[in-house]
Amino acid sequence: MIAQNVVFWILAVAMVLAAIGVVRSNNLVHAALYLVVVLAGSAAQFILLAAEFVAWVQVLIYIGAVIILFLFGIMLTRAPMREDLALDNDQRLAAAVVSLFLLGVLSTLLIQAFGDSKIDITGPQGSELVNNGRAGTLAESIFSTYVLPFELVSILLLASLIGAVVLARRD
Amino acid sequence: MMNFAWLIPAIPVVSFALILFFGKKMPRQGSEIGIAAIASSFVLSCIVTVQWIQRVDETVSEHGLGIVRAIGKGLLANSEEGVAITPVINTVEWFRIGTLEVAVGTQIDGLAVMMLFVVTLISLLVHIYSTSYMHGDVRYTYFYAALSLFTASMLTLVVAPNTLQLLVGWELVGLCSFMLIGHWWEEKANTNAALKAFLTTRTGDIGLMIGVIVTFFAAGQTFDIVQINVLALEGHGGHTIWMVGASCLLVGIIGKSGQFPLHTWLPDAMAGPTPVSALIHAATMVVAGVYLGARMYGVFWQGFSIADGGVNPMALVGGITILIGAALAFVQDDIKKVLAYSTISQLGYMVMGLGIGAWVGAVFHLFTHAFFKALLFLGAGSIAYSGTHHSFDMKKDMGGLRKHMPVTFWTFIIGSFALAGIFPLAGFWSKDEILATAGQGGYEIFMVVGLVGAFLTAGYMTRCVWLSFFGEYRGHAHPHESPKPIIVPLIVLAVFSVLAGLANASAFGIEKFKEYIEPHGEAFPEVLTPQFDVGLAALSFAIVVIAIGVGGFFWVDRRELRALKGLTDRSGTAKAGHSFLMNKYYLDHLYERGIVGGIKGPIARAAYWLNQNVIDGVVNAAGRGSAALGRLTYRFVDQDVVDKAVNSIAQETGNVGGLLRYVQSGRVQRYALMLFGAVGVLALSLVIFS
Amino acid sequence: MILAQFLVLAAVLFCIGVYGVLARRNGVLVLMSVELMLNAVNINLIAFSAYLRETSGQVFALFVITIAAAEVGVGLAIVLLIYRNISSPDLDQLDQMSG
């Protein structure tokens, strides 16, 4: 248990710092790279929670595809790659206040509600967890209980594909 | 068959999809699918109608001969143990929220049967008419698809057993009318008209939505229409909540049925193709509001205390609409606009009829009006198609068409006479029914309003017929009679315009309409059955004849009347009144600049504008108007009260808008900041209060 | 491990994302911040999935990842369009809706 906790905290600190980097960095490419750290960190957290398949999907889709897309976006909009103070707007302070306020409310609420709930990952329950995280188990769930949402998601992907093409097309 | 009534709206839905996907590949570009679908819906509607009549007969015969005789004399509503002829309701579960089950299905009763028949018949005729009228149109297939969907939505609304399904049908009708009014969207004016129709009716729809919610809670959480009516009549939960509910629903009716003060969209809706205008004005869109009033009658009966007589909002709105609609019809040069204002005025009769307890009269008027108004619109379309090269301007392009287009002329004459209320055509009977109920139910003022309306109606129709069919031809086309697909629907409608009134010719003791259409039982109030009043009927007939005479006398080219004719050009006062009417009481200006602009612009501008245009305009017009004599004086409506109320509302809206515009920075992130802040505050309040 | 530590971590990431969405001028950066928020949701879903011993949470996380990918695609197309129209990815200049 202690080992997992140590790993969790190391990861958590790294993720939070990287996330702050994403929103505070004055260089767009750096921000994208910080985002990679956050996403990879959460993939590691997923493994910690025995969600193996989701973790790999996270690495493949997010880090593999989404980040590349972002880098292309940065390139195509010819955003300044140099240090630039103008990346933040004038409501920075208000935004900080609002998000800190939101954080306070959210964490109070969460600790109040789930303060002493434990996740048990040892013994037979642990192996059940590991089993739950396997691709096969998830596939059964997706193609039986969630088959309709799954189909809907595929239509959504198609729609967004066409939408993105239509939007970005020069005409 | 009554258990399979869901097929009637389902068939046009299917045809909509078929036309959309395969229409272009069909030999006649999809029109044949639409016609076949509507025709089968029409046949099914006829079957349902016959079965309903049989059902009523059976129920009545089970209860013995005495009641049959009582119904024959129209005394059933007065006899204490009326036979309850229950509607045939078939539903399937649509969705379920907690314990609340929301159903979708069909409710077949007299009212629904009547509407099914009218909607499918008119729609079928419009479909046939359009094969010729819309021939060669760029979006011919699309037009037929939209027509199918339009009909399907109206049929969905008509058979709705609960308010939620009714709301769905209602909104679909609005959407389809938007599509069809803006059918020729290449011209900016048409797009604007479509948008205006959509947004104005939307304003009323908010009322309907709130009304649905209010009645839902007032009736103990149910959407079921029968149950809502029953509970409303019992006064379940107190009178006030039903009054609120009825008022909200009335706002919906005002928006949809073009009642004052939200009538301004209807004339602009003439931008759509003429068959669409006929469909909108006769059978679908605008009568949806009246239908709602008839369907939820228990709520209105209770909410507005209709049984007590006197004045209530519903009758008042209807009465005002009769007069202003009819007055506006006098100054239009566009034949379709004359008919549009005439529709507004006739819808006023229906709403007023509902408001004064003349349920049968109102529904009967809806029935007869559907035929002759469709006839008139299609006739106007026929003129434009073959007589004037697509112009609707009576003064510039018409005149003398009587000789060139005999069938159109005669059918148009029949339609006009039916509309004006000439004995024994359709309009006479239905209008008389409403007036008689008004006279005998303690609503004498509204009877007078109705008689004045009848006078005006006959007047403007005389003007319209005179300008289009008599005198010299003023256009530049080669007028000839229209082809068969246009002529045949005109003749069919003319036949109905002549005969439909006999369905409830109370003078002859025929009260089929009352017998089969009027619901009996606890979901329907005991409405007054008026006795046929020969004196009143004779009076209204005389008024109509006089109006036609006066109109004819005035518009026929007579030298001694020249002095009167140029009146609007020479006399300042008459001109003021004329332009007041031409500008449609400045209501459009008020809406566009006062309300829309008031929200957008700074307070000062709104106040300045209000001061300059509306208040000044009204004061000036009123000042001059008081001096105005002759034919214009009777057209003035007392604008003082209404306008002051509207003005102060607009001014307040302007003030609030001026304050709120600082929030409207137009920057998405500013909005997001407020959003997240608000979410945080809400979450905090949840933490604190739980 | 306790559940709350994952939840609070997710809340922190979410709020950092909110800050980014509110305070960044560049459209691409705003989208990145949205990704942060979505990712925080995913951590919540997985944590609850482990806590309740349910696969549903992971299935939903997969859906969220898919939808996030779709959202980035459309979002970047929109940013591209904005850039093409006003020659800048700055969201500040998009104030045509100002009242």
Image: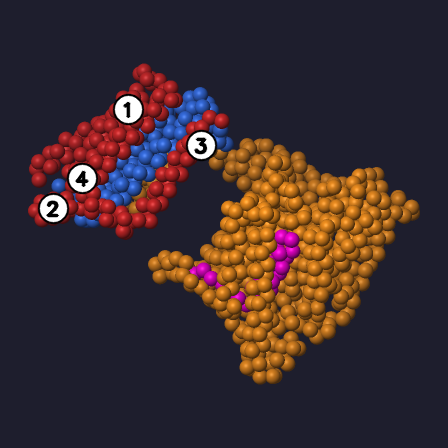
Element type where label 2 sits in the image: helix
Q: SS at mark 4?
A: helix
Q: Which residues are magenta?
A: B103-128
Give the Cα separation between the discs numbered 2 and 4. 13 Å
- Whether callout 3 and callout 1 share a subunit is answered yes
**Distance CA(mark 3)–CA(mark 1):** 28 Å
Q: Is label 1 in a helix, a strand or a loop?
A: helix
| Vertical arrangement, residue B150 with respect to residue A21, above or below | below
Pointers 2 and 4 in contact (CB under 8 A)? no
Of B22 and B528, nearer the camera is B22
Chain letter of the residue carrying label 3: A
Where in the figure is residue C67, as x and y percent of width and height? Answer: 33, 38
- Can you tell which quarter of the image residue A4 is in? top left
Which color was chain C given? Answer: blue
Of the chain colours in the picture, the one used for chain A is red
- Occupied quadrant, residue C92: top left
> Viewer-proximal residue, B646 or B423?
B423
Classify mark 3: helix, strand or loop: helix
Residue at 35% across, 35% down: C71
The residue tagged 2 is A127
Sequence-earlier tag: 2 or 4: 4
What residue is disc 4 on?
Answer: A52
Q: Is residue C44 above or below residue B162?
A: above
Q: Is residue A54 above or below residue B354?
A: above
The answer to which of marks 2 and 1 sits earlier in the sequence is 1
